[in-house]
Amino acid sequence: MLYLYLTVQMFFLQKSEPVIHLLHSVLVSQLRDLFVRFVKPTAILSCSKLHHIDFTSPCNHLEDSELFVGHDVAEYISNCTQQLALHQFYVSVRQFYVVACSYMVKRYPFIRTVEECCSSKHCRKKQARFCFCEVLC
């Protein structure tokens, strides 16, 4: 969770120009990046809004062999000759992804907000400071 927080903080606080119009797309992109690691593509494509996906349902989760665990871990698992508790490992991986996505859906502003309004084509053509006046007035 700290990684997600720091990523957003660094991206938006380290810019010299206003970038609020990018916030919504960055948040959606982060959520999508997590979903593709453990949610079936059919579940992702079936929802029009990314934050409405039922990612907690086991029937929407990828099979153990398809879960993203990183290259080094996948290589270790395939090359390991000793018996591993893989079932518990994959349960923990899914639990991690579900907790991370639950946090994002709960805390991030995925509903239509000023950030989403500012990410429209109309506002991208103008500076963000003017966009706020138009959206809020």
Image (tube, rainbow, N blue to C red):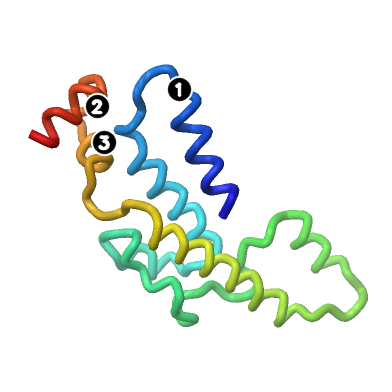
Q: Residue furthest top?
A: 16
Q: Amino acid at mark 1?
A: Lys
Q: Residue furthest left?
A: 137
Q: Are marks 3 and 2 in contact (CB under 8 Å)?
A: yes
Earlier along the polypeptide chain: callout 3 or callout 2? 3
Q: CA distance from mark 3 to mark 2?
A: 6 Å
Q: Which residue is mark 1?
A: 15
For the residue pair 115 and 125, the one nearer the viewer reads as 115
Residue 76 placed where, x, y %?
83, 63
Q: Which residue is mark 3?
A: 119
Residue 124 image label:
2
For the residue pair 56 and 106, the one nearer the viewer reads as 106
Q: CA distance from mark 3 to mark 1?
A: 17 Å
Q: Residue at x 80, y 68 (%)?
A: 77
Q: Is residue 66 left or right of residue 120?
A: right
Q: Is residue 58 above or below residue 72?
A: below
Q: Amino acid at mark 2?
A: Arg
Q: Is residue 21 left or right of residue 60?
A: left
